Image (cartoon, rainbow, N blue to C red):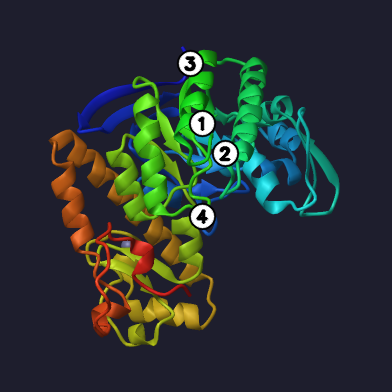
């Protein structure tokens, strides 16, 4: 039996279920912390697990360059190497090749690029990407694809998507089927309805254990992302897991789960944790801000993580001011715990049939940030939109 997904409840188009993998079960909707180079940065695997996280993501691109896929294989695979015994999803390397390499060369067969580590030349094809993910021992392997840049013309997006569909077939042919393992196809087509539909059709004709939506969260903005999900999600198979790649902020997750997405990954909680940004039940805090210097209250009184139960905002502020590594460690821990708690709340709300009310209550509490301290001068009326956590406080 390959990797599968069991549907358990729905509320509108939001779904709750369980992903069944070779390394255990995972309740969905699920947020996967990103463990780029064989580690969720600043966290031990036990610490990641203590946040409630049950599945993590590894990056093919980074691991193939260092320490090398064959070496990870000889070390017993990624689970053993990083002491993570739950399921792992690996990306295909395509996105990083496109985003981290200016000197890449794309052809029908694959991509040639130079390592950002030592300048050496490497080549990724669908067959090699699948082979690498096999060596890493990924429970979920992703098809090798070209992530279409944004914005793209219809012509460019169509050409790119059709290349990815040919690569999806080659990825399927190269994938070695094993008990509890699966291969996900990636829907492309930028923000064009006809191209997304063509891509879903091409992938379902091939057949995959799950389907991802790629090419979003690349600068199109939340409104355009939701619009694309609105016409793409109804086309996707209902009995398979759906994964929105690289998303997102808490309000992105709430909106995408409402539209039927089951799986997410994003660097926001971990990267923000290293740059003093805390996601809390009352909004986003910049812990570098001097207003926290003598604040003895917890980061988030509703959170049960060590940063919130053992320390004050003042101490965390001090750690960042002093450049102590414990600052990023505590804030990463907290942010991952916040995301896991949020996903658990969403799942409970789906099962209880109260998704709209629960998410409205969660978003209504997002008031913390500079504007909560000193109300801004009146602005011209704006079109009402979904509260966006990232808007609440200026970037560090
Ligand atoms: Zn916390």
The nearer-to-camera label among 1 and 3 is 1
Q: Which residue is mark 3?
A: 2
Q: Which residue is mark 2?
A: 154
Q: Mark 3 or mark 4, which has the lower sequence index?
A: 3
Asked whether the viewer can see residue 323, the reply is yes
Drawn side of residue 354 relative to residue 133, left or right: left
The nearer-to-camera label among 2 and 3 is 2
Helix, strand or loop at label 2? It is: helix
Q: CA distance from mark 1 to mark 3?
A: 29 Å
Q: Mark 1 or mark 3, which has the lower sequence index?
A: 3
Q: CA distance from mark 1 to mark 4?
A: 19 Å
- Identify whether 326 is placed above or below 178: below
Asked whether disc 2 touches disc 1, contact meaning CB atoms under 8 Å apart, the reply is yes
Residue under the image location 80 percent in, 36 percent down: 123
Residue 82 found in image quarter: top right
Q: Mark 2 or mark 1, which has the lower sequence index?
A: 2
Q: Residues within 10 Å of mark 1 (few under 14, many from 20)?
A: many
Helix, strand or loop at label 4? It is: loop
Q: CA distance from mark 4 to mark 2?
A: 17 Å
Q: CA distance from mark 2 to mark 1?
A: 8 Å
């Amino acid at each position: 039996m390959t990797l599968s997904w069991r549907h358990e409840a729905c509320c509108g188009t939001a779904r709750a279920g369980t992903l069944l993998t070779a390394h255990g079960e995972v309740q969905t909707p699920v947020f996967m912390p990103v463990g780029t180079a064989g580690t969720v940065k600043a966290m031990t695997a036990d610490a990641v697990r203590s946040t409630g996280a049950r599945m993590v993501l590894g990056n093919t691109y980074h691991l193939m360059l260092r320490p090398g896929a064959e070496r990870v294989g000889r070390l017993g695979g990624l689970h053993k190497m990083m002491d993570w015994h739950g399921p792992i999803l690996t990306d295909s390397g395509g996105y990083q090749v496109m985003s981290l390499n200016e000197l890449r060369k794309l052809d029908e067969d694959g991509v040639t690029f130079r390592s950002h580590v030592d300048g050496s030349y490497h080549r990724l094809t669908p067959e090699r990407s699948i082979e690498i993910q096999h060596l890493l021992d990924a429970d979920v392997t992703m098809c090798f694809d070209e992530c279409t840049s944004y914005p793209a013309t219809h012509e460019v997006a169509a050409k790119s998507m059709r290349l990815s569909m040919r690569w999806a077939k080659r990825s399927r042919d190269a994938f070695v089927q094993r008990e509890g393992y699966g291969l996900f196809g990636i829907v492309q087509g930028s923000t064009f309805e006809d191209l997304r539909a063509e891509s879903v059709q091409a992938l379902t004709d091939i057949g995959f254990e799950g389907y991802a939506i790629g090419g979003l969260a690349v600068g199109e903005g939340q409104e355009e992302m939701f619009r694309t999900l609105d016409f793409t999600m109804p086309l996707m198979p209902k009995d398979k897991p759906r994964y929105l790649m690289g998303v997102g902020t808490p309000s992105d997750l709430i909106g995408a789960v409402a539209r039927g997405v089951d799986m997410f990954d994003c660097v926001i909680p971990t990267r923000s944790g290293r740059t003093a940004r805390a996601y809390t039940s009352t909004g986003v805090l910049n812990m570098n801000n001097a207003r926290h210097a003598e604040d003895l209250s917890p980061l988030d009184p509703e959170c049960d993580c060590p940063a919130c139960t053992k320390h004050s905002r003042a101490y965390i502020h001090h750690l960042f001011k002093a450049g102590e590594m414990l600052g990023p460690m505590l804030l990463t821990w907290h942010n991952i715990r916040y995301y896991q708690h949020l996903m658990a709340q969403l799942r409970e709300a789906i099962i209880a049939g109260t998704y709209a009310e629960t998410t409205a209550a969660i978003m209504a509490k997002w008031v913390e940030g500079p504007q909560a301290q000193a109300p801004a001068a009146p602005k011209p009326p704006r079109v009402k939109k979904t509260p966006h956590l990232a808007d609440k406080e200026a970037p560090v």
